[in-house]
Image: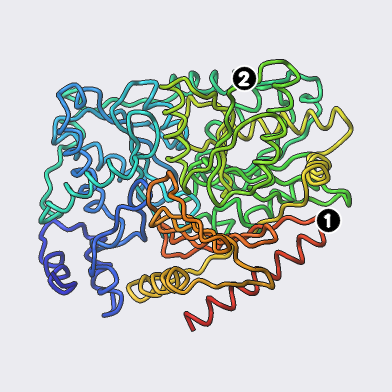
Amino acid sequence: MTWKTEWKKWSTHKELPSELKKQMTEMNEREREEAFYKQLEFGTGGIRGELGAGPNRMNIYSIRKVTAGLAAYIEENDTEAKKRGVVIAYDSRHGSAEFALEAAKTLGAHGIKSYVFQELRPTPELSFAVRYLRAYAGIVITASHNPSEYNGYKVYGEDGAQLPPIAAEVIVTHMSKIENELLLEVKEERELLSQNLVSYIGENLDQVYLDYVKGLQLNNNAAKTNLHIVYTPLHGTGQTLVPQALQNAGFQHITIVDEQKNPDPNFSTVSSPNPEEAQAFQLTIQYGKETGADLLLATDTDADRLGVAVRNNDGEYTLLKGNQTGALLLHYMLSQKKEKGILADNSVMLKTIVTSELGRAIAEDYGVKTVDTLTGFKYIAEKIDEYKKKGTKTFQFGYEESYGYLIGDFVRDKDAVQAAVMIAEAAAYYKQQEMTLYDGLIELYETYGYYKESLTSFTLKGKDGAAQISLIVNRFREHPPAEIAGATVERIEDYQSRKRINLLTAQLETMDLPPSNVLKFWLQDGSWFAIRSSGTEPKVKFYFGVKQGTESESEERLKELETNVINMIESIVY
């Protein structure tokens, strides 16, 4: 089926909403092809894309189609699965509330119960709610930290984690059998209510979740009352829970960035609601300077990612990288648990394959095993579930470099609410020692070595972009470099074939991980870089990691590695 056939099908559909009709009339030839040449792909746990008309865009019909696929997946199980139902949450983006209701209306047409949050709520609370309500699945309408023209749809299993690949494939198979998403049946909200196929949830569940978060505290020191925090939800869902969670933990001096506290689908004060980017912290830093704050916190739209800024030795604010925040959280928690005698002998820390090796060094120092997973928090959640069922290991902490952290396993996804409370507690602890979090970070580097990491992304949109991304990854896979930045390539890990080869000894190993389109190159000096094609965005990502004896040496080596690899990429693309 060509894009022109799809275009005609949509343009002749009598019930197409007027807004979508208008968008179609305003499209040029290229825009039409991009919007209609394929369906949105079910990537990392769901679909994500630009808002608009067409099967390759986010709209009520793409929502209905993926939900119909989920409904068929649920119907494959017994009647109990349908009764247990699906929890649905949403963020502050354009269309999020409408899409949440469309999902409930589609599920209702299949006789499947929905629990819909009355107002926007963070993704981690959705994960918690699925487990707490014993629902069979969960849906969250969000595009996380993407720009305002995007929205998305993530699916969660009964364990509260994003769906693993096998379950996702079943949903994709059911979706592929839907010939015309424009004709999918839905029930109206009043029908759902009269037939008890939808229930609205909210504040009661908030309180239960917040009680669990409070239970994570390791110290109730007096310094909490003197710690000054500035927090911004970046126009997203964090405002509903983060300030209350901090107050519950004993923090009294919390200033909210007023211009960014209310939901705003246009994210009018930032170019992107992404706490990984410095621009998102501009107002927060301004507030910090005005109030003399010790700690600055920012959450993304659905409050699963946390950004942190702290005062450095010059009195200015330094934005911590995700790897740095993760290392500080890990060290604080392990040191406190060991001191209190509550660190289990079979403890484990989970991180992704592109997350800093500093975490491994810290964990090893405390006798804690480190296990690597593929990129994506669902793989960390899978391991937590496995250890819980087998009773073989005690989960202590999970994190990824992209600002995602998990402390308490009552949630099975990254949780910025938990992380905000724990990093504030760590800051209070250091303040009691007359230190800042920045001092604590330098202490870690001096103890374990100066680990430095970076990330470079190439955004290549559309049909041509997808072909270029494939070309880049395949070129490195089929013609791997033997030397980079003056160092010999020692090992190559191909997560697609699940093979690790030592180029110096020709030793070949099979890696015990699911297949994924990722390549990782280890150099003889301990440096590494990885290539990963994003499952949710039109991007190919390059991760870099080094370790040297001093900060300047690490920064110099990191720059050298980045420059060499980027030159190779540009020679392929351009």
Q: Secondary structure at mark 2?
A: loop
Number of disc labels? 2
- Whichever of callouts 2 and 1 sits on the residue coming sooner in the sequence is 2
As drawn, the residue found furthest toward the top would be 341
Residue 279 versus residue 393: which sits nearer the camera?
393
Q: Secondary structure at mark 1?
A: loop
Residue under the point 69% across and 73% down: 486
Residue under the point 56% across and 41% down: 351
Q: Quadrant of residue 123?
A: top left
Mark 2–mark 1 contact, CB under 8 Å?
no
Residue 325 in the image: above or below residue 199: below
Residue 150 seen by the camera:
no
Q: Quadrant of residue 270?
A: bottom right
Q: Is residue 166 left or right of residue 179?
A: right
Q: Is residue 309 left or right of residue 466?
A: right
Location of residue 506 in the rendering, given as x and y in whole percent from the top left corner: 51, 61
Location of residue 216 in the rendering, given as x and y in whole percent from the top left corner: 61, 22
Residue 130 versus residue 549: which sits nearer the camera?
549
Residue under the point 59% across and 26% down: 347
Residue under the point 45% across and 23% down: 388
Residue 57 versus residue 409: which sits nearer the camera?
409
Residue 65 versus residue 15: which sits nearer the camera?
65
Residue labelled with disc 2: 344
Location of residue 103 in the rendering, given as x and y in whole percent from the top left corner: 25, 41
Q: Is residue 179 left or right of residue 119?
A: left
Q: Considering the image in quadrants, where does the N terminus appear?
A: bottom left
Residue 482 in the image: above or below residue 41: below
Residue labelled with disc 1: 550
Residue 557 seen by the camera:
yes
Location of residue 566 in the rendering, given as x and y in whole percent from the top left corner: 59, 74
